[in-house]
Image (tube, grey):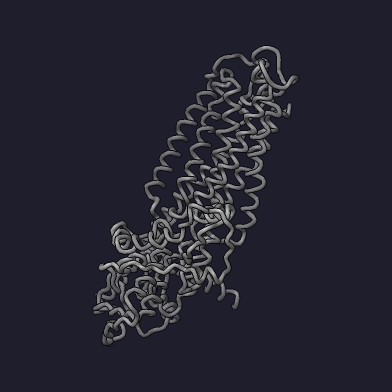
């Protein structure tokens, strides 16, 4: 005989099932809940790590928490199922779970968004990524909505999309409930009522067309959205385990709704339903989603921190050997240093397995990184954008370098450079060249760098600066940034919806130029501290991964030619 949503049959007794299996479910739900909460707390404390900053934890955690509440209800449903009214399960299954599933899978699509958005950092450019233009005084309603949508960040777009979908879903769920007499006898469509004993009524309430909106919603995300994500991510190979996490989440949800339907409607599942109620198949899916969303990133964070520590230890060993050999000591955070006379290829050939903690190692120093940034930054920039999803860091350094070059700002080399000791000669320090362009033009160019990479409200991917460095730059640029952004968004409130088509030439001509005063604190070295922080971040995070990939590629190429 077929059962209901909570595994009840007409023969079930209206009492809690606190037997051995019931106690196991309660203990298991408690232990897993505490384990999951501990994992989420760990990720939240480490949320500023590069590997987590781009993942959009708030929306992901919101979906996980909503689904986990459902998971707890279902896992312990074996115990209290005979006592719980089916109306309560209907609303939980019809609203609570779909909202959690929608938020989770919407956050899961962030992987594709980041992968596509990072592509713009793969190529070096001196142009701002966003041009602020004055909008016409009168715009149509359609254009106003389009502008509003474009100004939303990805998280808010996700919430807006989920909100629209959930509004439709909730409306259908309420409509189904009002039309069916299964849950109320006083109104509804004739012929939908159920009769019999309370257990017979409860068993009948757990099945039927009233549950279709919830079924459709789950199938939509698991069998339409998830396969699209899998297909579009087939050529994305990142270094952060995010693709593995996304694929695991997509596959984990495929079986849930079909097996739930089989358990409800297949008579052969009745013996299983006595111990494993139908929605437990959804609970299994949720548990795998939690594993891939919480514990895989924890493993990736610990792996990244271990790699960073190995890199620092390798640098420390190399610096120790340099000092022992009579070379000048060089601090890891030293900004202005120069490579020795050897070429990059020579240094690559001399490098050994220092990334894994071996004894070789000048390849992991700031010297090698700065030489690459100066002579051949394109491969590193492409790797950081397409595989490490941290392309904004290298792009920021390149934009600052181009900004200095454009305004003829020469930066003095650091004293005591290790390269001088290695090459056996000491180059003369070049003098600081005077600024050729006006301070206003220099500030305007720097303002675009701030808007593209540093601004909390405008930068699509913020570089990871310390709060002290960020506040210092914010104090210099934020007022000017707000003037530019606010000027772009102003419109005529009296007639806001009159058509005013614009051409590309109009947009170019309407580009906003900052006309305010140049802050007194602004100077040629305004980005110096930020450069130090970002170079150190690249050195200890992206750079070791890049070296590993280069070595793996070289080893593969050598093996193929042999």
Residue most extreme to the front = 494
Q: Nearer the viewer, residue 187 or 485?
A: 485
Residue at (63, 48) in percent of width and height: 225
Residue most extreme to the right = 191
Q: Is residue 97 left or right of residue 55?
A: right
Q: Nearer the viewer, residue 366 or 25?
A: 366
**Residue 280 drawn at (x, y percent):** 59, 32
- Residue 243: tell me if it is visible: no
- Residue 258: tell me if it is visible: yes
Q: Quick check: 281 above or below 552?
A: above
Q: Quick check: 64 above or below 118?
A: above
Q: Nearer the viewer, residue 112 or 37?
A: 112
Q: Is residue 98 left or right of residue 434?
A: right
**Residue 136 drawn at (x, y percent):** 52, 61
Q: Is residue 367 left or right of residue 188?
A: left
Q: How many numbered circles does the render carry?
A: 0
Residue at (40, 46) in percent of width and height: 44
**Residue 538 drawn at (x, y percent):** 39, 66
Q: On the rendered image, what quadrant is the C terminus found in?
A: bottom right
**Residue 227 drawn at (x, y percent):** 65, 50
Q: On the rendered image, what quadrant is the N terminus found in?
A: top right
Q: Nearer the viewer, residue 510 or 417?
A: 510
Which of the 4 image quarters holds residue 86? top right
Which of the 4 image quarters holds residue 368? bottom left
Residue at (52, 45) in percent of width and height: 159
Residue most extreme to the top = 197
């Amino acid at each position: 005989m077929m059962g209901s949503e909570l595994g009840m049959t007409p023969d079930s007794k209206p009492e809690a099932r606190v037997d051995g299996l019931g106690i196991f479910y309660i203990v298991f739900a408690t232990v897993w809940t505490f384990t999951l909460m501990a994992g989420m707390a760990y990720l939240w404390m480490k949320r500023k790590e590069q590997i987590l900053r781009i993942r959009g934890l708030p929306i992901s955690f919101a979906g996980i928490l909503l689904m986990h509440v459902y998971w707890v209800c279902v896992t312990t449903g074996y115990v209290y199922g005979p006592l719980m009214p089916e109306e309560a399960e209907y609303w939980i299954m019809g609203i609570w779970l779909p909202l959690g599933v929608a938020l989770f899978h919407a956050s899961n699509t962030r992987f594709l968004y980041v992968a596509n958005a990072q592509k713009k950092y793969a190529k070096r450019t001196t142009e701002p990524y966003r041009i602020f233009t004055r909008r016409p005084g009168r715009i149509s309603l359609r254009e106003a909505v389009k502008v509003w949508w474009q100004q939303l960040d990805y998280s808010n777009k996700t919430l807006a999309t989920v909100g629209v979908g959930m509004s439709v879903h909730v409306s259908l769920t309420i409509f189904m409930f009002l039309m069916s007499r299964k849950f109320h006898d006083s109104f509804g469509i004739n012929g939908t009522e159920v009769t019999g004993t309370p257990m017979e009524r409860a068993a009948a309430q757990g099945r039927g067309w009233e549950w279709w909106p919830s079924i459709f919603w789950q199938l939509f995300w698991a069998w339409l959205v998830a396969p699209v994500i899998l297909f579009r991510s087939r050529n994305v190979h990142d270094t952060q385990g995010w693709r593995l996490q996304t694929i695991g989440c997509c596959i984990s949800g495929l079986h849930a709704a079909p097996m739930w339907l089989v358990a409800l409607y297949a008579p052969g599942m009745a013996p299983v339903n006595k111990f494993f109620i139908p929605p437990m198949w959804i609970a299994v899916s949720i548990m795998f989603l939690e594993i891939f969303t919480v514990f895989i990133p924890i493993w990736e964070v610990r792996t990244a921190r271990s790699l960073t520590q190995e890199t620092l230890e390798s640098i420390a060993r190399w610096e120790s050997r340099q000092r022992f050999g009579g070379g000048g000591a060089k601090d890891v955070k030293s900004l202005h240093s120069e490579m020795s006379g050897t070429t990059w290829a020579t240094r690559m050939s001399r490098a050994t397995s220092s990334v894994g903690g071996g004894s070789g190692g000048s390849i992991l120093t700031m010297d090698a990184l700065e030489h690459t940034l100066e002579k051949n930054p394109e491969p590193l920039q492409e790797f950081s954008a397409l595989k490490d999803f941290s392309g904004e860091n290298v792009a920021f350094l390149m934009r600052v370098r181009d900004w200095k070059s454009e305004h003829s700002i020469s930066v003095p080399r650091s004293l005591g450079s290790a390269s001088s000791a290695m090459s056996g000669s000491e180059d003369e320090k070049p003098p600081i060249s005077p600024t050729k362009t006006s301070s206003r033009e220099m500030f305007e160019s720097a303002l675009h760098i701030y808007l593209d990479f540093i601004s909390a409200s405008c930068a699509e991917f913020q570089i990871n600066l310390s709060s002290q460095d960020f506040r210092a730059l914010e104090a210099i640029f934020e007022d000017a940034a707000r003037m530019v952004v606010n000027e772009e968004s102003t419109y005529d409130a009296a007639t806001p919806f009159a058509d005013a088509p614009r051409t590309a030439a109009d947009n170019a001509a309407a580009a906003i130029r900052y006309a305010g005063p140049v802050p007194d604190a602004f100077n040629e070295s305004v980005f110096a501290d930020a450069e130090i922080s970002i170079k150190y971040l690249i050195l200890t995070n992206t750079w070791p991964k890049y070296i590993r990939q280069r070595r793996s590629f070289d080893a593969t190429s050598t093996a193929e030619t042999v």
